[in-house]
Image (cartoon, helix red, strand yellow):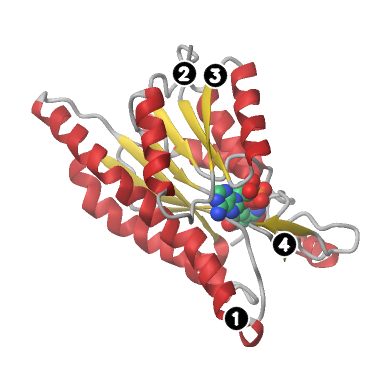
Amino acid sequence: MSKANGKLDGQVALVSGSGRGIGLAIAKKLASEGACVVVNDLDAEPAAGAVAAITADGGQAVACVGSVTADGFAERFVATGIDHFGGLDIIVNNAGYTWDNVIQKMDDAQWDAILDVHLKAPFRILRAASGFIREKAREEADRGEERFRKVVNISSVSGVFGNAGQANYAAAKAGINGLTRAMAKEWGRYKVCVNSVAFGLIMTRLTEASARGDAHIDIEGRQIKVGVNPQILESAQKMIPLGRSGTPEEAAGAVYLLCIPESNYVTGQVLVCGGGRP
Ligand SMILES: NC(=O)c1ccc[n+]([C@@H]2O[C@H](COP(=O)([O-])OP(=O)(O)OC[C@H]3O[C@@H](n4cnc5c(N)ncnc54)[C@H](O)[C@@H]3O)[C@@H](O)[C@H]2O)c1
């Protein structure tokens, strides 16, 4: 049973990359407000953990494991929501990682991987959802019903303002804001609100510095260095007007605002969630 009396009762949400970090917090928040959530992650274990945590809390969730960049993934993700929960109301394109380097050291594979995960995959997921959304929106319009659906694309301040060492990531995250604005215009007629949330510094494994500042994550067999050097992290935190970095739960709060009925007339926007600092 989904939770009753939530703001998202009866809605079906897809959240990519929701086995850890911000995506996990988003999946939990949407489920706690009554949404049935399709959890996705590259890794089966965190995806199963997210489903277990949501169901233990009385919510409903199912896992769709796999890389958002894989051929056929987008269709499988969308079909999981429709087949398992009977609908599709919210799509959060969150999955991704950083793979930084200065431009002279960035090879084509590094550029392509980041563009694929942050930009091409969301495009494919929205394209895969378009048939269902258009069909349902037409049926609802014929009944005189105005039912809003929500897409929230996860961007970054790097995509809005740029960041040295992130040519690939900044380009991809700027690209998703372009996709957001185009889709808001294309899908307005179907009552789909399409917005981006551009995060500043949020504490997850992507940003948490290890003692030596050399944390690595495993992405499809590649060991990728992530984490912010502790000294840079400290000085970055000092420049945030709210005085600290954000938590995944605070990041999820910004996404949630764009999923609830109170934001039904907000579309095509990029909301910066960065504690007051770009
Ligand atoms: N943490 C920050 O400060 C920050 C700032 C701006 C934007 N973001 C963005 O927020 C999103 C979430 O990042 P996070 O900080 O929570 O990172 P995270 O590493 O804690 O969580 C991301 C999850 O996405 C999964 N993932 C990665 N590639 C995937 C793929 N190809 N297919 C499916 N799942 C995949 C990972 O396995 C991981 O569980 C990303 O899009 C990131 O770029 C984060």
The residue mark sitting in front, 4 or 3, is 3
Q: Residue furthest right?
A: 211
User: Circle 2: is it few (<14), some (14-19), or many (20+) Cα within 10 Å?
Assistant: some
Q: Which SS class for mark 1? A: loop
The residue shown at (34%, 32%) is 88
Kindly identify the amino acid type of the residue bearing the numbered disc 3: Gly
* Residue 270 place in picture, x, y as percent: 43, 55
Q: Is residue 5 left or right of residue 245?
A: left
CA separation in Å, label 2 and label 3 = 11 Å
Q: Earlier in the sequence, mark 1 or mark 2?
A: 2
The answer to whether residue 80 is visible is yes
CA separation in Å, label 1 and label 2 = 47 Å
Q: Which residue is mark 3?
A: 59
Q: Which SS class for mark 2? A: loop
The answer to whether residue 276 is visible is no
Q: Earlier in the sequence, mark 3 or mark 1?
A: 3
Q: Which residue is mark 2?
A: 6
The residue mark sitting in front, 4 or 1, is 1
Is the residue indicated by label 3 positioned so its CB lies within 8 Å of ligand 1? no
Circles 4 and 1, Cβ within 8 Å, touching? The answer is no
Q: Which residue is mark 4?
A: 239
Q: Which residue is mark 1?
A: 107
Rendering quarter of residue 9: top left
Kindly identify the amino acid type of the residue bearing the numbered disc 1: Asp
* Residue 271 place in picture, x, y as percent: 47, 51
